[in-house]
Image (cartoon, coloured by chain):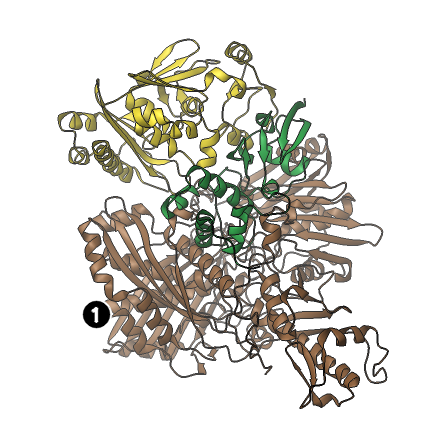
Amino acid sequence: MYNFQYQRPGDRAAAAAAAKAANARFLAGGQTLIQAMKLRLSSSDALVDLGGIADLKGIKVDGANVVVGATTTHATVARSAEVQKAIPALAELAGGIGDQMVRNMGTLGGSIANADPAACYPAAVLGLGATVNTDRRSIPADSFFTGMYETALQPGELIVSVSFPVPQKAAYIKYKQPASRFALVGVFVSQGAGGVRVAVTGAKSSVFRASAIESALQASFTPAAAKAVKLPADDMNSDLHGSAEYRAAMVSVMAARAVEKALSR
Amino acid sequence: MTDMSQPPNSPIGQSLRRREDARFLTGAGQYTDDVVLPGQTYGVFLRSPYAHARIKSIDTAKAKAMPGVVAIFTGADMTGIGGLPCGWLITSKDGTPMKEPPHPVLAQGKARHVGDQVALVVADTWLQARDAAEAIEVDYEELTPVIDMSTAETIGSAVHDDVPNNVCYDWGHGDKAAVDAAFAKAAHVTSLTYHNNRLIPNAMEPRAANAHYTRHDDAYTLYLANQNPHVERLLMCAFVLGIPESKMRVIAPDVGGGFGSKIFLYAEETALIWASKRVGRPIKWTAERSESFLTDAHGRDHATTAELAMDAQGNFLAMRVKTLANMGAYLSTFASSVPTILYATLLAGQYKTPAIYCEVKALFTNTTPVDAYRGAGRPEATYVVERLVETAARDMKMDPAQIRRQNFITTFPYATPVGLTYDTGDYAAHLDKAIKIADVAGFPARKAASAAKGKLRGLGYSCYIEACGLAPSNIAGALGARAGLFEAGEVRVHPTGTVTVFTGSHSHGQGHETTFAQVVAAKLGMPVENVEIVHGDTGRIPFGMGTYGSRSLSVGGTAIIKAVDKIIAKGKKIAAHLLEASDTDIDFENGEFKVKGTDKKLPFGAVALTAYVPHNYPLDKLEPGLNENAFYDPTNFTYPAGSYVCEVEVDPETGKTTVASFVAVDDFGNIVNPMIVSGQVHGGIAQGLGQAMMEGAIYDTGSGQLLNGSYMDYTMPRADDLPSFTVDHTVTPCTHNPLGVKGCGEAGAIGSPPAFINALTDALGVKDIAMPATAEKVWRAANKIA
Amino acid sequence: MNVDISLTVNGRPVTVGVDPRTLLVQLIREQLQLTGTHVGCDTAQCGACTVHMDGRAVKACSMLAVQAQGATITTIEGLSQDGTMHPMQAAFRECHGLQCGFCTPGMVMSAVQLLADNPKASEAEIREGLEGNICRCTGYHNIVKAIQFCQSGAQPAAA
C-alpha cells in the first residue's frame, strides 16, 4: 500500500482534529479499508485509527430506539441480548455479515460510511428509518445514502452512533453472491410506527427503498403481496453472478421471505 | 510377483494417523514462503495489463533509480537461453508435428495474455520492488485479442506470428471409417454440444520460489512450491538455461496443494535462477493470489460435440467426438497431451462400444496457458461419456443403470478401441453397491417429499474409469512423450536398523510420509516409526518424475518395494553367512531371517548392523552396507473405476441447488490407508462439484481481461456449499504391481461433474445445462425463462 | 516513519517499531518469524491468516499491526500448551481434517472460535461458521468431522 501518516487519537475531539488534515481517512475495523489500500485502490495521506476511542463503542436500548456506537463490531451487535430482544432482525443481519473473523473487526460505522452497494447494514439503516448521528449533526436514513460508495457525510465528519427505531416487526433476508458472500440481493422489511419500509441492497448502485413493494405491503402485509410485485430491471446491477432481470425477480422473492420471517416471530 | 500377503497386525489397510500432521497442526510446516535466506532480495514481476500487445519499448531508468532496487531485467536481457519447453509432441492428422512457437521466459516483443511477465524487479524489500515495478514505463501497442475458440482460426489476429491461424494441432484418434459406418446404420443417435468450463486450480498455497546462486561452488539452490523437483531441474537446466544438472539443487519443501498447477516449468522460477547469479544474492518471490489467477496454468476449457450411436435395444455401436481445446497463449509443459492422449483414450469408458473416433483441434488464444488440472483429460472424457450415456438412457426411455449394465465390459483383460488395455475390473459390483447405498429405490418418495415443499429433486449417475499410474515409458514415448515416466526409490538401512526411504514421489497433501512408511514397515516387519520417508529434494533423492496422474503409490510405491526386495535379498545373503546356511535356505518373515525348517533366526536389526560392521561377513562375495535403489517402469496404466450417485434438490424460486447426497463407490484395488484414500475422494468430489456448480474462469471476449480474477468473483466451494459425502469401495486388485493398487488422487474430480449435471437435468427435466450451473441458469431452466 | 507498538504474542511481550503499513500477518511472519500463520489470498477471503486477538478470531491480513497495539495475540504456534496439542488440533489429526496443511492453522483457529461461540453447533451451523476459511484439499468433510469430534469431548485413539 502507499505510505501514510498513522495516528491513534484517544478521544473524539482529537479524532476530529486529526481528520482535518487534507486527505485523512478514519480507520475503524479496517475490513474494507485495509483491503482497498493493499490493492492500491485507496490511498490517504493520513489514517486516523478510531480503535482507541472508548465512547464510540457500545449498545444502548432505551425502549423506542436501539443506539449502536459507530465502532461497535458486527459480532457484538449479533451477540447482544438486548438487540436480539428489541430488534432481532438487526442482530441477525449483523450475524450474517462476512464471516466470523470479519464480524470480530468490522464495524457499523465503517460499513455505512463506505456504503458498498452490496453491504448489509445500509439495508438495516434505510429499512428501519434509522438516524445517523455524527459529530456535527443527525442525518436521517433517507438522506444518508446518496450513490455508489457515496454518503451525505462531509470530509472529516465522524459517525458517532446510529439510532435504530424499534419496529413492530422486521426481518432481513440476504441472498448471498456465492463468491464474495456479499448480498446479491438483500431485503430488509420493517413494519413500524411510520408504516412499512422495504430497503434493498445489492440490486442497484446504492441501497434503495422499493416503494412498489412498500405500497403492496402497506395494503396487505403478506409474503404473497410482496412476491406479486414485479420490479423493472432497468437500473438493476448486472454481473457474472446475476443479470438485472434475475436481480429484479429476486428482490420480490427475498422481500416475500423477509415478510414471512417477520410474521413468524 | 512379490508376495504381499499380510500378517494379522500389518499396517497395510490400517487408517494410521498421519505423522505429517504434527508439524502442520502446530505451525511448524515449512512452505517455500517460510524459507528465509540471509541477504535475500525480493522479486516482483511486472505483468502485461493487455491480452495481446506489441511491446514497443520498456523504460526502466526511473525504476532502477528508486530506493532499494538491486536490478531490473526484461526479455531483452535474457539472451542466449532457450524458451520454456513442452514435454509432449502431438502429431496432426496430416502427419505434421504440432506448432511449437517460442515460449520466452520474459516477454520478447509481445505480450500474449493479461499477466504475461514483462519484467523482473529485484529489490531489498518487497515493497520497494513493488513500488519500482509501478515506475517502469512500457509502451504497448494493443492488438486484437484472440479469446473465443470458435473464431480463433478466422479472426485474423495471430497469437504467435508464425501460427497465423492459431491452430497448434489438428489430431485424430480411433477408427473414423468404422464409426461413420456405424452411425449410418444406427437406430438412434444421442448427441450433446457443450463447453467443459475453464478452471483455475487455486491450491491454497500460492506459487513461490527462492533462488540462490552460491559462488563458492558455482551452483544453484532453488526452493520451489513444486510437485516434481527432478523434472523441474531437468527442464530448466537442459532446455532453458544450459546449466549442468549437477550444479542445481531443487528443493520442494512442504507444498500447500498442487492439483497439477505446480508440475510445470514456469517463467518465474526460471527467471529467478537466471537472475540470482547476476544479482549475487538470493531472490525470493511469492505470487499474490490475483497473480496466481493470471499465471498458474488453468484447466479444462474444451468445446465439444459428442454423439453416441445405438441399436434399437440401447447397445452402444459407436461414439464420435469433436473437440476444440484451448492451449492458451503458450504451450505449457504437458498441455498438448491433456486433450489428446489423456482424453481420447478414455472414451470407451466402462463400455464395450466397438468403434470410437475423436478429433481434437488445439488452439492458441490470448489467455493464460492451459495444462493438466486434477484429472487432466479424464474428467473431460468422463463428462463426454457419462453425459451421453445418461442422455441416451432418457432418449431410449431406459433406466440409466440398466443401459450401463447392458453395455459394461465384463471380461478382462479388455483392449479398448482407443488404445488402452484394461487389466481388471468389476463395474457391476460398484454400480450395485452405489445404488444400494444411495437408496435409489427410495428416490421417488424423496422426490415427492421435495415436491410437497415446492422443490424439484433429481438423481444422476456417473460410472467413470480412468487411466492413471502414469506410465509405461515406451508407450508414452510412442505417443509423443519426450520424457520417461518411471519412478525411483532408494532404501537406506542404517546400522542401528532404522530405515530412510528416498522417493521420487512428492507429497503435497497425499500423506506419503505415512503411507509409504506403512508399506515399507509391512515388508520389513518393523514398527512404522522406524521408517522415515524423504521426498522433494534433488540433493538427497536419486531421481523422480514426481507426483501427478495418481501415480505415487502404484509407480513410486512399487519402485520402493523393488528396492526393499533388493534389501531383503542382500539381507538373506548376510543372514545365510551368519547362520551358516546357504543363501537359498533363508526365508524372511515378520522382520526375521530364518533358516527354512529350523528355528535358527536373526532379527533384521542384527543383519543391518552386521552389514555396517562386517566382521563376520562374506567380504569376498558381498559388499558391506545395506542401501539399495530401484527404478520402476510400469507395464501398463492402472484403471481405477467407480460408480457415483448424486441427488440434488432445486429451489425453483431462486435456482439455488443443494446436493442432497453424494455417494461414491470406487475400485482403487487394494487400499493401504483407508482414511487417506477417502480423504482424496472427498477433495476430488469437492473440486468436481466446484466445476459443475460454481467455478469457471470467464474472459471478456473483447478485451481479453479475466473478469473473475479473485475470490470476490471466482466462486470457490466453501463448507456450506457441500454436503458430507458417502464413500465406499469395491476391490479388484491391480494385476501388474505388487501392492495391487490403482491410485485414487483424481477419481473424485473425474467422476463427479457428470453425476451432478445428470442429477440436475433430471430434476429440471431438461436435456442439458451448462457448467457451472449457477443459480440464475437453473432458475431460467426451471421457470422456462430464456 | 515507524510507530512503536507493544503487544503480547503467544504469552510473550513484544515491543517493536513498525512501518505503519505493516500488516499484522507480516509482523507475525516476518518480524516474529512465526510462519505458521499463512497468506493464501489478497482479498481477505481465504482465512489462512486467522489468529486470535483478545480471544476473538481475526484475519491477520486484514489489519494493520498498529491496530493490535495493547492486544493479546495467539497464533497457531501458541495454541498448544507445553507440547500438548489443543483438543481441536488433536481432533483434526484424529479425523484427517487436513491434507496439504496450508489452510490448517487458520482453519483450526477459526474452528476454536466457532465452538467457543456455539458449543452445540449443528453440522449446518459448523459449515456456515467456516465460510471464512477456504480449503482446496479436504472437501471439508473431515474438517466438519474433526470439529464434531472436538465437540463430543472424545479422546483420540492410540497414535
Question: x and y percent of residue B553 in the render?
Answer: 57, 69
Specify whether residue C146 is in view: yes
Q: Does residue B474 lie above or below A114 as drawn?
A: below
Question: x and y percent of residue A43 in the render?
Answer: 55, 24
Q: Does residue A131 lie above or below B684 as drawn?
A: above
Question: x and y percent of residue B745 in the render?
Answer: 50, 63
Residue at image coords 23%, 44%: B653
- The quadrant where residue A68 appears: top left
Left or right of residue A228: residue A176: right
Outermost residue, front side: B599
Q: Does residue B115 lie above or below B15 as drawn?
A: above
Specify whether residue B136 is in view: no
Q: Colour of chain A?
A: yellow
- The quadrant where residue B384 appears: bottom left
Residue at image coords 67%, 30%: C14
The quadrant of the rendering that contains the N terminus of chain A is top right
Question: x and y percent of residue B775 in the render?
Answer: 31, 46
Q: Colour of chain C?
A: green
Q: Which amino acid, by three-letter code, is at mark 1?
A: Lys
Q: How many marks?
A: 1
A242 or B668, nearer to the observer: B668
Left or right of residue B287: residue B382: left
Badge 1: chain ID: B
- Residue labelled with disc 1: B397
Badge 1 marks a residue whose secondary structure is loop
Q: Which chain: brown?
A: B
